[in-house]
Amino acid sequence: MCNCNKLNEVVVDLDSSWISQSIPYQGKEAFSSYCEEIEAEEFEPDLNYSEFYYACIDCGQAWYLECAPVEPTFPLFGIKLKNIGQILSKEEIESQKNFIIILAHNGFEPSKCRTANCNNFKLKGKELCHMHLSIP
Ligand SMILES: [Zn+2]
Ligand SMILES: [Zn+2]
């Protein structure tokens, strides 16, 4: 059984062994509903690191998925689509990723990112902002 209908519109699998566990994610508990595993196993087409658009075979949910570069692969990051055939722009994907990384880190510190000329705030407990520290 899949868990698609219990998942948020956008999810990242922070518990995956693929994501470095040496980085503590301070927002993982507070925003746990965004940090869940996509449990569906059967997709149309089959999961593939270089493909991004899928439908869950169990429930028909359409997904934009980014998979781990391993064999067999599995989804690390997902955005629910309204219907099969919907294509997201680069900006839509990027804004959802920024949103989820900010949640995963539970927001910002009141000081600026260490990257030269970057005016963003640092993520909580980090030296960098959401543009310069990325997940997956
Ligand atoms: Zn499903
Ligand atoms: Zn930055």
Image (cartoon, helix red, strand yellow):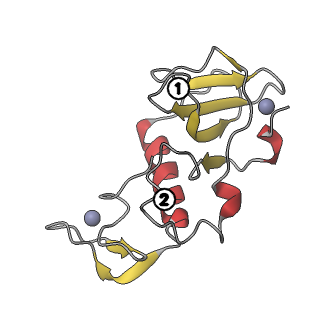
Q: Quarter holding the N terminus? A: top right
Q: Residues within 10 Å of mark 1 (few under 14, many from 20)?
A: some
The number of discs equals 2
Marks 1/2: CA–CA distance: 19 Å
Instruction: Specify the quarter for ligand 1.
Output: top right
Residue positioned most to the left:
116
The x, y position of residue 52, in whole percent, is 53, 26
Residue ID at (38%, 53%): 134
Q: Tell me where residue 127 sits by quadrant.
A: bottom left
Residue that numbered label 1 is attached to: 52
Q: Residues within 10 Å of mark 2 (few under 14, many from 20)?
A: many
Residue ID at (63%, 21%): 85
Q: Is residue 53 above or below residue 101?
A: above
Residue ID at (60%, 65%): 28
Q: Is residue 49 above or below residue 116?
A: above
Q: Is residue 95 left or right of residue 62?
A: left
Q: What amino acid is at disc 2?
A: Ile
Q: Is residue 10 left or right of residue 101?
A: right
The x, y position of residue 129, in whole percent, is 34, 66
Q: Tell me where residue 115 sits by quadrant.
A: bottom left
Query: Of label 1 and label 2, which has the lower sequence position?
Result: 1
The x, y position of residue 54, in whole percent, is 64, 23
**Viewer-proximal residue, 84 or 78?**
78
Q: Is residue 61 left or right of residue 1?
A: left
- Secondary structure type for disc 2: helix
**Viewer-proximal residue, 23 or 120?**
23
Residue that numbered label 2 is attached to: 101
Q: What amino acid is at disc 1?
A: Phe
